[in-house]
Image: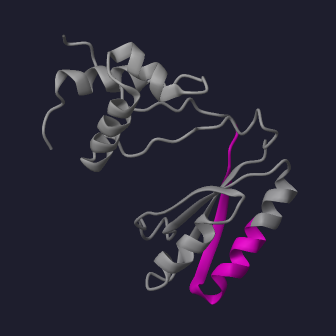
Amino acid sequence: MSALDPMDRRLVAATQGGLPLVPEPYAAVAEQVGLSESQVIERLSALQARGVIRRIAIAPNHYALGMTANGMSVWDVDDARISELGARIGALPFVTHCYQRPRALPDWPYNLFAMLHGGTRAEVEAKRDEVSAILGDACRGRDILYSTRILKKTGLRLRDTE
């Protein structure tokens, strides 16, 4: 992976705290760094294609949205079916992220993780039952880890070396 050129560094620095909450965020960033809106979009896309930026996404505060019973459900799913089933689970409207991780045997047999959100633990448990029904006999075990507080989510931070 090649180093960032000075403009890419300025662009990452301008967006590392998040996009501006305005109707045209890329235009606002463009004005800040001295590019056109289309150049900002092109450069961010190129950085993403190079793997410098993994994704551009919103990170909602689920607690502020009323979803206070959030649980990371973990599943021991048949490796031969995990891609197919993980895609189905990730597409559910109450799952914000779903991903495969390696098991850490013998203590941690789980290889599929899916964050479930709801207003109550009973609601989250019902959603976990929906996931369980989709996984069927491909699932050998499950657990859920409930959030007790929200953690600050941040992305890459560049040090000011210029």
> Which of the 4 image quarters holds residue 93?
bottom right
Q: Is residue 152 visible?
A: yes
Residue drawn at x 60%, y 24% is: 21
Q: Residue 139, image x and y in percent? A: 60, 81
In the image, 95 versus 76, the foreground residue is: 95
Give the answer, above or below, for where 23 lies relative to 132: above
In the image, 111 versus 7, the foreground residue is: 7
Give the answer, above or below, for where 35 lies relative to 65: above
Q: Which residues are magenta?
A: 128-148
> Which of the 4 image quarters holds residue 115?
bottom right
Q: Residue 26, image x and y in percent? A: 46, 28
Residue with the most extreme bottom position: 137
In the image, 126 versus 47, the foreground residue is: 47
> Which of the 4 image quarters holds residue 149?
top right
Residue with the most extreme left position: 2
Residue drawn at x 60%, y 60% is: 114
